[in-house]
Amino acid sequence: MILRELLRSAAVLGVEGDLGRDIRSLAYDSRQIQPESLFFAIQGERADGHQFIKQALEKGAAGIVSERAAPSDFASTWIRVPHIRRALSEISRTFYDHPESKLKLVGITGTNGKTTTAYLIRSILEAAGMKTGLLGTIEYSIGDRTIPALHTTPESLDLAGYLAELVQAGGQAAVMEVSSHALAQGRTCGFPFQTAVFTNLTGDHLDYHKDMESYFAAKRRLFEGDGTPPPELGVINLDDPWGARLLKVEQPRQITYGIESDAQVKVKHSSLKPDGVQATLLTPEGKLDIESPLLGRANLENILAAVAATEGMGVSKESIQKGVAAVRQVPGRFERVDEGQPFTVLVDYAHTHDALRNALKTARELTRDQLIVLFGCGGDRDRTKRPLMGEAAGNLSDRVVLTSDNPRSEDPILIMNDVMVGLQKSGKSYIAEVDREAAIRKALEQAHEGDLVLLAGKGHETYQVLKDRSIPFDDREVARRILREMGFRRT
């Protein structure tokens, strides 16, 4: 596509150089540059794209897009824009022929529950006969292709490319987890969501957003519309006090859901069992009987969100029932590890104090005897949640094993010391073991028949991030191996 045509869709402050260049690809990572690429120099949190302009030009870049003025000695094409990430979104969508306009986009935001809610909504839409893509924390599922997710919400260039691929594959809808980072940075700017879902808001990512008001303001953007009109349908958890504030955002339609509140989609009665959830829901369309193999109260709330969203989109009762029942397991979300042992082992992604509390409350409902929890806290992230997680673990479990999560650049011992403040406040005795594999072994070796062991924090992750490298590490596989070494075998 000719550069001049690409720029018609973007806000541009000035251009120096040839606008007649043919642009064959776009890139914001200099390692992805090909001949005739347009390179977006983005000032990131850890790296500055302007440092790689020379490398981009050497690899054949046809032009540079930046918020800065061109250097006085710059000899190629330079496009100056007021907001680099908005420009990236505007130009990317034009480059890929606006795939976002050919799909129904469903965006889910909130601290906890996004992933499971996304899986449920996709399953329901598929049951209704709609070919649906999924982009979220675990994976990007595009047509017949599934790839591990690099970010919960892709950069706008990648998102436009994935949506174009989905359109080419005959897709009709895309369900996306939309993170607060993505909303704050404008990664979804210009993408028109038909439906926006809010799950909840609890303390997390405050290392980035600094305070809860800023965190909420980022989430609210999904409902206000960012470079687009507001979504046609807002789906809001009325049990959450932040949800009540979202009701004030002007939208064409809103549907509320909740377990405790008098919401539009609510529970008439429910049964939470070791093999799943059974419930009768009350919705604007009447009663709806639901059966799901997913476990616990938190998943009942996720089911309510998915029902509210899809019923609001016009999906039939039968498709909703079929779609909910079809989601048997979400990777790393209360995922069972079964090697024939006489106690239950569950792996969950809970990595905030609220998520850990919810996970432990659900685990307690499924436990006949002792509840054992293993957890840690990530490095280079919000430190304020560490003692809160320790206190939650101590108050809500019978035995605690404290270990390392993804320490990143921090000393894992110092991270654990922060957590111990909360553990000691709870008064619960605990085991501290910095080596996560050794800690998992200690947790499993404590368990007896009727107990439940919850391995919390990493969920679906298959790696551990250390100071200078990432190493392969999967709680599920480590637990399976240790259980086999303990003599258990699934028959």
Image (cartoon, helix red, strand yellow):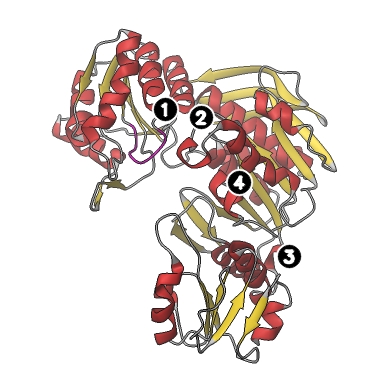
Name the residue tied to disc 1. 384
Residue hosting label 2: 203
Q: x, y (%) of residue 135?
A: 55, 54
Mark in front: 2 vs 1: 1
The residue carrying pointer 2 sits among few (fewer than 14), some (14 to 19) or many (20 or more) residues within 10 Å by Cα, namely some
Q: Quadrant of the C terminus?
A: top left
Q: Which residues are magenta?
A: 377-382
Query: Which one is in front in this view, the residue at disc 4 or the one at disc 2?
Result: 2
The residue type indicated by label 2 comes to: Gly
Q: Earlier in the sequence, mark 3 or mark 1?
A: 3
Secondary structure predominantly adopted by residues drawn in magenta: loop
Closer to the chain start, of discs 1 and 4, is 4
| Viewer-nearest of discs 2 and 3 | 2
At label 3, which amino acid type do we have? Answer: Lys
- Image quarter of the N terminus: bottom right
Task: Give the residue drawn at x 16%, y 32%.
Answer: 438
Answer with left or right where residue 30 lies relative to residue 178: left
The residue under label 4 is: 123
Query: Label 4 is placed on what type of residue?
Result: Ser
Quarter assignment of residue 351: top left
Kindly tell me whether residue 90 is visible in this rendering.
yes
Disc assigned to residue 102: 3
Residue at mark 4 to residue at mark 2: CA–CA distance = 29 Å
- Dot 3 or dot 4: first in sequence order is 3
Mark 3 secondary-structure assignment: helix
Q: Quick one: 144 or 237, which is closer to the camera? A: 237
Q: Is residue 491 visible?
A: no
Percent across and percent down for residue 421 are 31, 18
Q: Per the image, is 155 magenta?
A: no
Q: Pick whichever of labels 4 and 2 is earlier in the sequence.
A: 4
Q: Residue at x 47, y 53 (%)?
A: 151
